[in-house]
Image (cartoon, rainbow, N blue to C red):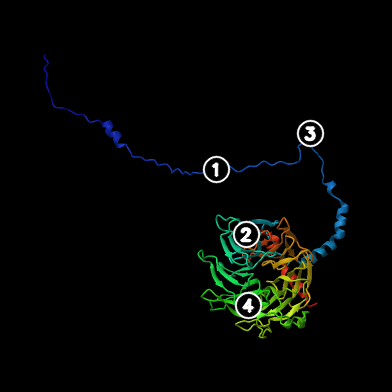
Amino acid sequence: MSFVDGAGDAVSVESLWRSSQGSRCESRSCQTRPVASKESSAQAHVTSEVGTQTEWEQDQRVLDVDLGPLLDYPDVGKFLEGVEEVMIRELQKNWRSRAFDDFEVSWEEQNPQVSCLHSLQYPDAVAERLQVTSVTWNSTGSVIACSYGRLGDGDWSTEKSYVCTWNLDRRGFNPNHPDVVLDVASSVMCLAFHPSRPSLLAGGLFNGEVLVWDTSRTDDPHIGRSGLSVDSHMDAVYQVRWLQEVPQSHRLQLLSVSSDGKILVWQMEKEGQLVLHNGFALVSQQMPSNSKVNKHGWGDAAVGVTCLSSSHFDPSVFVVGVEGGYLLKCSTAVQTAALTTVTSSIPLKAPAQFAFSPHGGPVYSVDCSPFHRNLFLSAGTDGHTHLYSMLQEKPLTSLQLSQKYLFSIQWSPVRPLVFAAASGEGELLLFDFGRSSQKPSLSIKQTANEKPVYCLEFNRTQTQLLAAGDGAGVVKIWQLSSDYTEQGAREMNLLDELAGAAAD
């Protein structure tokens, strides 16, 4: 037998195992639930240590006693039963009481202090030993103006003086560097900012002139002048006051008073001139019948006017103080001609209608109450302040606030029972009728060497501020406490009771 190589056809055998396994394969899928995630942060709480004054004793014993029986006091129960009826009756009476009906709780923090915010001065005026003769706030309450002059001695008619203004809210405010300095040829006796136009300022001079400045104009602030003529004052102007603007009229009007006895109303013209619009004159022959002025001895002699205040309730009514110590109730509605030989371009009228009991010397300041139509205050050289009612001759009360002169007095614009006074002893006095009817509630020493305080004015916009000028040439801005700026619930009732004393 023999073997040989040979090639045959290929044979393939198909795997039954693979096919059997493949027929049993299934597709499966698996999905987990979504995992929620969140970012958060933690902040540690502020901690503080607290201690007590009680010291811990190491050897303390536990009192294992029932205190119940010891707290049962039969006598206390009997006492409470005995007073129960009285207590219930008093509680019911208090519940029916209306004593606290008008009481309002103030949750604001009270400021018990009165502090000096600023001491303003113009070094050139201080170097010349000039005095602050007047201060006034503008309508925004942020600008204070003062005039410099000399009230005690010197040749007033030829001595130069200044008018200075400071903006307390201005960045870079410097108490020794005024924002505006106006040079004036004659001593400035009084100032008044316009009640609604913050840059308009009026002033009265020792030589009898009345000037108006616009402090917003840097090139030439001077915009009005009365000049020296037959219509102008022949003596020092002691007060100027802006009048209410006439509806549909752009003409500004202001009033001036002088020791020459004339009360003049000026109107601003386009040419920068103040033209006489109306006028009054006080002469001894036409003083009210209840005054004790020697009418026959003085004849047509002028009665010098030193101060004036208009009623806040009737603009036609005003009160003036005169050199003889009298206070006169006057009216702008009078038609009686003044019996004077003084030359004037318009007829002057006699305004005086009623005289009040006089001070012991010239009256330097008068102010009508902004809260009551009949009340007004006065201050004079006798060191007294008088509270008057328009309805009677004698004062409701008379207070001696200084051993020297009282130069200025003014009601608070927000507290009906509060007023301030400036004394010749260098003090600024705050008086509150709600606390005492006999003595000031606060005396502030403005000057260290007892230089007189000549002028003051409350800020009607920022009511916590009070400005006062003194004989050392300094204007101090005082911040009043809440006691002097927040009106009490029954304050108006107490003011009515003060005024009611006139009818008793």
Gap between marks 3 and 1, in whole Å?
Answer: 42 Å
Above or below, 338 against 123 in this view is: below
Question: Callout 3: 10 Å neighbours few (<14), some, many (20+)?
Answer: few
Percent position of residue 137, x then y: 61, 65
Ranked by sequence position, the earlier of labels 4 and 2 is 2
What type is the residue that disc 4 sits on?
Answer: Leu
Ranked by sequence position, the earlier of labels 3 and 2 is 3
What type is the residue that disc 2 sits on?
Answer: Ala
For label 1, the residue is: 42
For label 3, the residue is: 59
Percent position of residue 8, x then y: 13, 24
Which one is nearer the viewer's eye here, 154 or 103?
A: 154
Ranked by sequence position, the earlier of labels 2 and 1 is 1
For label 4, the residue is: 264
Q: For mark 3, give the secondary structure.
A: loop
Gap between marks 3 and 4, in whole Å?
Answer: 94 Å
Question: Callout 2: 10 Å neighbours few (<14), some, many (20+)?
Answer: many
Gap between marks 3 and 2, in whole Å?
Answer: 79 Å
Furthest residue toward bottom: 336
Question: Callout 4: 10 Å neighbours few (<14), some, many (20+)?
Answer: many
For label 2, the residue is: 125
Q: For mark 2, give the secondary structure.
A: helix
